[in-house]
Amino acid sequence: MSGVLLADRYISPMTESDLDEVAIVERLAYEFPWSRGNFEDSLRNGYFGICLRHVTGTLIGYCVLMPVVDEMHLLNLCVAPPAQHAGAGLALLREAVRITHAERLAGLLLEVRPSNHRAIRLYERFGFASIGRRKNYYPARHRSREDAIVMRFSFEKEGVDGLA
């Protein structure tokens, strides 16, 4: 995975030098953000970190992928609030699927909050299917915990149409 140019944006591997900026975007985007240490641990453990930047160098978004046996697990996908609704999430998702396919894994698994309707629509349009629910998975402000919808993109069932 090297720097891939996408019009006015490019994708590159996440490195230690990206983590301060990643942590800032994470805090801006999420009520319950990952810590910088969570990202450090992910890179140290050999997970795939992907950054999407504007050609000016500004961080637009990122994602973290963890290979598990025969699947990839999308642990975190985030787009900076000012860059949302401009295709950045789709670009990151395409790269996550491309890496999963390149690693010869059968599919890509993720969890998403039921309250995150925009993300659910993105995943469904891409070809992810809901396969289950994890009870009390996420912290929540107005209740003790929020469930997670578990979704999966399968190369066996869906092909690689989302890569187009």
Image: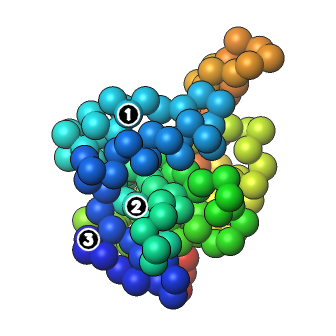
Badge 3 density bin: few <14, some 14–19, many ≥20, Cα 10 Å: few
Badge 1 density bin: few <14, some 14–19, many ≥20, Cα 10 Å: some
Q: Residue at x 38, y 33 (%)?
A: 36
Q: Nearer the viewer, residue 58 or 139?
A: 58
Whether residue 50 is visible, yes or no, is: yes
Task: Identify the residue position indicated by label 2 in the image.
Answer: 51
Residues under numbered marks 3 and 2 in contact, where contact means CB atoms less than 8 Å apart: no
Q: Quadrant of residue 37?
A: top left
Q: Is residue 78 above or below residue 163?
A: above
Image x and y of residue 14, in percent = 31, 56
Inter-mark Cα distance, 3 to 1: 22 Å
Inter-mark Cα distance, 3 to 2: 11 Å
Task: Identify the residue position indicated by label 3 in the image.
Answer: 1
Q: Residue at x 47, y 32 (%)?
A: 34
Inter-mark Cα distance, 1 to 2: 15 Å
How many numbered callouts?
3
Instruction: Tell which residue pokes out farthest to the top in this image.
Output: 144
Q: Quadrant of residue 30?
A: top right
Q: Is residue 17 above or below residue 9?
A: above
Badge 2 density bin: few <14, some 14–19, many ≥20, Cα 10 Å: many
Label 2 sits on what residue type?
Answer: Cys
Q: Residue at x 33, y 68 (%)?
A: 12
The local secondary structure at tag 3 comes to loop
The local secondary structure at tag 2 comes to strand
